Image (cartoon, grey):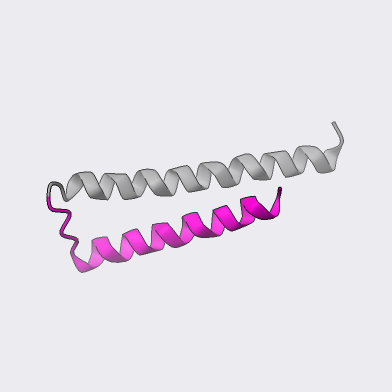
Amino acid sequence: MDTATKERNTRRVDCTFRVLDAMEDIRDIWRDTAPLQDLDEAQRDKVLKKIGAARKALDQLEGLL
């Protein structure tokens, strides 16, 4: 496998793990705030930040296809 292909594949995997990590963090917040999931300001900001990080990683992943 050539270097460019190996680099691209590594970046794909890295992006995938960044998305999964962000989703896990969001799931932890849902669990911590169950059953109502009534978020305070800090939790809401954290969820929005994690969604943004996941979206960015997904965009990068899509660009690598």
Q: Residue furthest bottom?
A: 41
Q: Residue furthest top?
A: 1
Name which quarter of the figure residue 13 lies in: top right
Q: Position of residue 35 (x, y in %)?
A: 12, 47
Specify the principal SS of the magenta part. Answer: helix
The answer to whether residue 18 is above or below residue 53 is: above
> Is 49 colored magenta in this rendering?
yes
Q: Residue furthest right?
A: 2
In this rendering, would 59 be left or right of 43?
right
The mark total stands at 0
The answer to whether residue 46 is above or below residue 8 is: below
Check the picture and name the quadrant holding the N terminus.
top right
Please tell me which residue is depicted at 55% across the width and 43% down the height of the picture.
Answer: 16
In this rendering, would 2 be left or right of 28?
right
Q: Position of residue 24 (x, y in %)?
A: 37, 43
Point out the stretch of residues depicted in magenta. 36-65
In this rendering, would 37 be left or right of 15?
left
In this rendering, would 25 be left or right of 16?
left
Please tell me which residue is depicted at 69% across the width and 55% down the height of the picture.
Answer: 63
The answer to whether residue 10 is above or below residue 55 is: above
Please tell me which residue is depicted at 40% across the width and 57% down the height of the picture.
Answer: 50
Name which quarter of the figure residue 7 lies in: top right
Please tell me which residue is depicted at 27% across the width and 64% down the height of the picture.
Answer: 44
> Is 45 colored magenta in this rendering?
yes
